[in-house]
Each structure stands twice: as C-alpha cells, then as structure tokens.
Image (cartoon, rainbow, N blue to C red):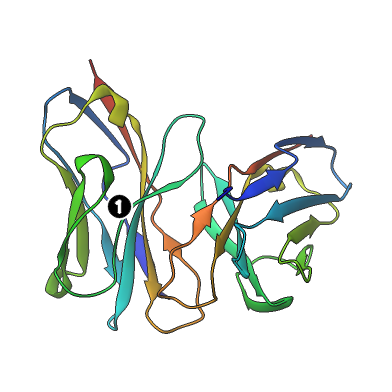
Amino acid sequence: KAGVTQTPRYLIKTRGQQVTLSCSPISGHRSVSWYQQTPGQGLQFLFEYFSETQRNKGNFPGRFSGRQFSNSRSEMNVSTLELGDSALYLCASSPRTRAAETQYFGPGTRLLVL
Amino acid sequence: AQSVSQHNHHVILSEAASLELGCNYSYGGTVNLFWYVQYPGQHLQLLLKYFSGDPLVKGIKGFEAEFIKSKFSFNLRKPSVQWSDTAEYFCAVIITGSQGNLIFGKGTKLSVKP
C-alpha cells in the first residue's frame, strides 16, 4: 500500500499571503489529522477530519482551516501568513477516528514564510 | 491539560551502548502510548505502541518500551545502539476511547558515535 503523500514538499511564501497544503491518506483510511512541527513547540495538533467532518481542533487561530473531500483527501489552508507559521506541516491518516488506532504520517510540507 | 514530558533533549552515545529514553505523561485515566522515530530527512515512523496487555512491548529494530502505570511512564530502551539509530524520538499519548488527538513530547535527539 502506498503511504501518506503530501504536496507540495516545500513552499516559500511571504507574509500576508495564503497557502493550501494537500494530503492523500493511505488507501482505505478515512481519518486525516494535521500537525505543525517547529523546533520550539515540537509537534502540535491542528485538526482532524473524518468523513468530511472536522472532529477535533487544536489550539490554533482561525487563520488555520481545513477540509476533507469524499475520497478522504484533505487540504489545509493558512490565510494571512505570519513569520511564525514557518514550520513542517505533517499529515497523518488512520482507518477510523478512534483513539485505539495508529496514525501513519506523511513526509510533511516544509513552509517558509519570509 | 494532558502533557507529555521527555526529559532528555539530546543524548549522545557510542555504538554498542545501552539506551533508555524517558517519557512521562500527565493524565489519570487510560491512555494509549506510542513511540515514533524521525530519521534525518525522513518522515515520522511508528517504533512501537502500547494499547493494553503486557506492559513490556517490543517494537522494530530491537527497541522495547515498558509501561509503568503507577509512574505514568513509558520509557524506551535498546540494549545496544547502532550508528543507524541516530534520529529524533518522540513519545506520544492519546486518551483511550476519545476522539482526541495525539499529544507529543518535545522529542529527544539521539546521536550515536561510530
């Protein structure tokens, strides 16, 4: 089975712009979660989608949003980019949205905001 | 709020040395526990997990971890490290039965000298 894929792998944006990142989960997985990884804060949960519905949201401002499509692919959007949004954004998928499941991570999208 | 503590930020060992990385979590209820590893330039990979049963769990590449409920700990061990174990190791927990998210520790960087 192919793993979790994320596109693009690298992005450079300037402050004030917006960005959309994409994640394709493992085939058959219906839950997609997004995380932000920075050297200072480590890995922090952004949100989780299951069956096109947001099931859980972390402590991030409303500039961070996401959605999930009927084929389970997910996108996250960050509007009005700030320098502090520079990070590695990781997507993880699992079969269902239950805590007993293991999440499988993609390679991430590295975002640099100038 | 639940949290995960990894006490060592950076560990440096010589090949064949034994490894123990500490992980403590703060939550009084039942949790599922994970160790993930991130090799240089690669994505997060599952090393091992504990859901229930035998508190000593074995993972890939000779790693094992012991869940001690009374100490809220899930320490990672390996009897003899190799240069190829150089990576960053993340402990994570999720509350059992919840629709909650993975809570990660800040990570421990392991450098193994050949």
Q: Residues within 10 Å of mark 1 (few under 14, many from 20)?
A: many
Please provide percent x and percent y for residue A2: 59, 48
Specify the subunit that label 1 lies on. B
Residue annotated with mark 1: B6
Please provide percent x and percent y for residue B73: 20, 64
The one nearer the camera, A16 or A30, is: A30
Q: Say if B63 sits above or below A43 in the image.
A: above
User: Residue at image x 63%, y 57%?
Assistant: A25
Q: Quadrant of the C terminus of chain A?
A: top right
Judged left or right of residue B77, residue A52 is right
User: Residue at image x 38%, y 55%?
Assistant: B105
The quadrant in which residue A66 appears is: bottom right
Judged left or right of residue B52, residue B88 is right
Judged left or right of residue B13, residue A81 is right
Please provide percent x and percent y for residue A5: 65, 47
The one nearer the camera, A22 or B112, is: A22
Q: Secondary structure at mark 1?
A: loop
The one nearer the camera, A96 or A111, is: A96
Q: Say if A44 sits above or below A14 in the image.
A: below
Judged left or right of residue B74, residue B94 is right
Please provide percent x and percent y for residue B69: 16, 73
